[in-house]
Image: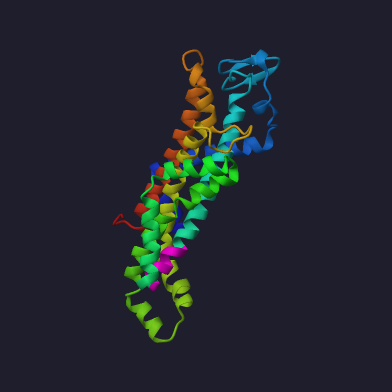
Amino acid sequence: MRGFLSAFGRSPAAVAGLVLILLMAAMAVLASWSSPVGAIQARVEDRLLPPLAQKAGALHWLGTDPLGRDVLLRLAIGARVSLLIGTSAVVLGGTVGTALGLTSGYAGGRVDRLLMRIGDMQLAFPSVLLALAVLAVVGPGLRNVILVLGVSSWVTYARLVRAETLSLKEREYVLAARAMGASPGRILRHHLVPNVIGVIIVMATFSVATTILAESGLSFLGLGVGGRTPTWGVMLADAREYMAEAWWLTAFPGLAILVTVLGVNLVGDWLRDYLDPRGY
């Protein structure tokens, strides 16, 4: 652990990425501690106040939107939603994909061909188009978005883990364990999973950034979380008509997405180089 932290500290890009992620996490915590009234309830008398504007004793650090709602508070709630969806969808997709990839690679034969053909069928549809189609049927909502984005990403994990498993199962220590009568479950748990976990972690890190972008796009199109919950995509969609007169309405949500995705990608790049200096 000490070596890991030391190597991490020697990478300015990784440290900068972690700082950006912690900044977004701090905003999410701010949303948990603050009252959501200012982010939801309209105050038309405070509409389109610029950043650092103060009115009625309240300081609006990032200004207000056309309905007088505080932009900073709405950004904070959006950070909580984006991080929740990003991590939850990745955990779901990574768990399903890893389990199926291990099964496909180790079992081989008909099981392998069946699972890979199912994956090929899903890959034939663009992931965003598939998510749009499913959400148009089941409707928007936090749980639905997590399920759709998680299920649509399992193929990437499955194919990557399958490729690693096909290589690992022919190694001497796996063949020796099989010759000694170890069950397939024991071989998977003790010999294969520990050796593919690094690949999974790197893939999951990059997938968080991709999922956050996908959620923002779905929210922009009106098929995201829905309800009165402010998300970064919704804020961008609502600000389209005010780009000329209120630049902050699009600048800050766009910057929040940029900072989050950049931070996750910087940490992911370092993890990839640290866990496998040869690269993928």
Q: Is residue 65 left or right of residue 169?
A: right
- The reply to whether residue 15 is visible in this rendering is no
Q: How many marks?
A: 0
Residue 250 located within the stretch drawn in magenta: no
Q: Is residue 86 above or below residue 251?
A: below
Q: Compare residues 221 and 50 and report the one nearer the observer.
A: 221
Q: Which residue is at the far left?
A: 278
Residue 103 located within the stretch drawn in magenta: yes
Q: Is residue 263 above or below residue 271?
A: above
Residue 155: percent from left, percent from top: 41, 56
Magenta residue span = 99-107
Task: Locate the C terminus and report the quarter of the image it occupies.
Answer: bottom left
Q: Compare residues 131 and 49 and report the one nearer the observer.
A: 131
Q: Quadrant of residue 213?
A: top left
Q: Residue at x 51, y 48 (%)?
A: 148
- The reply to whether residue 215 is visible in this rendering is yes
Q: Is residue 215 above or below residue 239?
A: below
Q: Quadrant of residue 172?
A: bottom left
Residue 272: percent from left, percent from top: 37, 53
Residue 107: percent from left, percent from top: 39, 73
Q: Compare residues 250 and 270 and report the one nearer the observer.
A: 250
Q: Residue at x 64, y 35 (%)?
A: 31
Q: Is residue 220 left or right of residue 116?
A: right
